[in-house]
Amino acid sequence: MRVRTAKLAGSAAVLTVVSLLAPCLRAQESEATLSGKVTDSSGAVANAKVSVRNLATSQSMEAQTDAAGTYSLAKLAPGEYEVTVSAEGLAPKKENVILAAGASLTFNAELSLLPSAPQAQPQTPANNAPNAPPGNKAPSLGDLGFSPADTKSNPKEQALLDKRTHMLKIHQRLGLITTIPMIASVATSINAGGRNTSNTDRTVHMILGSATAGLYFTTAYFAIRAPRVEGAKSRGPIRFHKAMAWIHGPGMILTPILGALAYSQKNNGERVHGIAKAHGPVAIVTAGAFGAALLSVSLKF
């Protein structure tokens, strides 16, 4: 009797254990596994994030790749999943897969580099704008008061402006050089025009005056021959500079002529007389007008 009771108790215990383990065994048989490898153009991608989302239940799981780029997600319920693979510096990849009950699916992903961001275009420096303050930039038609519409299709006018600018720069530099013999000529005029002057003093004064006249007319050539740009208007100091030219221009013509007359009279032992006596005053007025014209474009007011 006792033996029979013991057998019944043992059978009951076995049935109880089997009934408890059966659901677990059935669950293990229905679970699926997703594994694979993540790579890019250079090889395996470590520390990539692999996440799965069950489209039916919205439950999600995630894993991270190892140094070899492999990953594994186990204990997944069968069904359709959205798999997302991402890594730093790489474009993410998203794809749907279907896991069958008890299946082990391999899903490999190759990621590509993120598209490079467009480089910022260099901006035109502010000092290249037509209305920018004076600097090292080349002058433009806009500096002369032309609108952008006027200058848009005027390459010929721009070429004329470039040539004019070049010639006027030479004009200005020669004008500065001309002041050297001019000042020396004015300084030597004191000894050349006195009563007790020597022929040497007069000759030195004449040579300096001739050098001044030569440089002056060379300087004037570049101003006169510089091409004109239609529509350009003279403003400020330039207008004054041109106005002074009407004084020192005729004066520079008269001064050598009157000086030659005075030189001839002195060499003949005569006193300077007649129109030749105007040589000194004309020379002073001419030098003053020339100096004022030079300062008007050399200094900023």
Image: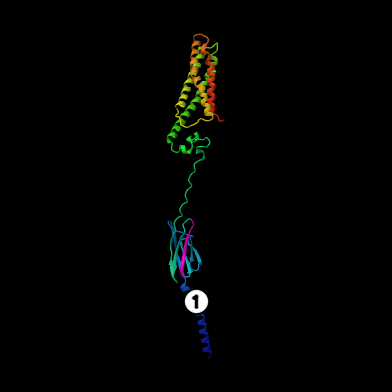
Residue 140 visible to the viewer: no
User: Which residue appears farthest toward the right when viewing the image?
Assistant: 301
Q: Nearer the viewer, residue 231 or 77?
A: 231
Label 1, on which residue?
23
In the image, residue 100 sits, relative to residue 204, either above or below, namely below
290 inside magenta stretch: no
The way the protein has been coloured in the rendering is: rainbow
Quadrant in which the C terminus is drawn: top right
Q: Nearer the viewer, residue 241 or 149?
A: 149
Residue 190 coordinates in the image, percent (x, y): 55, 15
Instruction: Count every numbered label the image shows and give the total.
Output: 1
Residue at 46% x, 64% y: name it. 83
Residue 96 visible to the viewer: yes
87 inside magenta stretch: yes
Residue 33 coordinates in the image, percent (x, y): 46, 68
| Predominant SS along the magenta part | strand
Check disc 1 and report its element: helix, strand or loop: helix
Q: Residues within 10 Å of mark 1 (few under 14, many from 20)?
A: few
In the image, residue 81 sits, relative to residue 205, either above or below, namely below
Q: Label 1 is placed on what type of residue?
A: Pro
Stretch in magenta? 78-88
Residue 12 coordinates in the image, percent (x, y): 52, 84
Residue 296 coordinates in the image, percent (x, y): 54, 27
In the image, residue 244 sits, relative to residue 73, either above or below, namely above
User: Which residue appears farthest toward the bottom when viewing the image?
Assistant: 1
Q: Nearer the viewer, residue 69 or 259?
A: 259
Residue at 49% x, 13% y: name it. 261
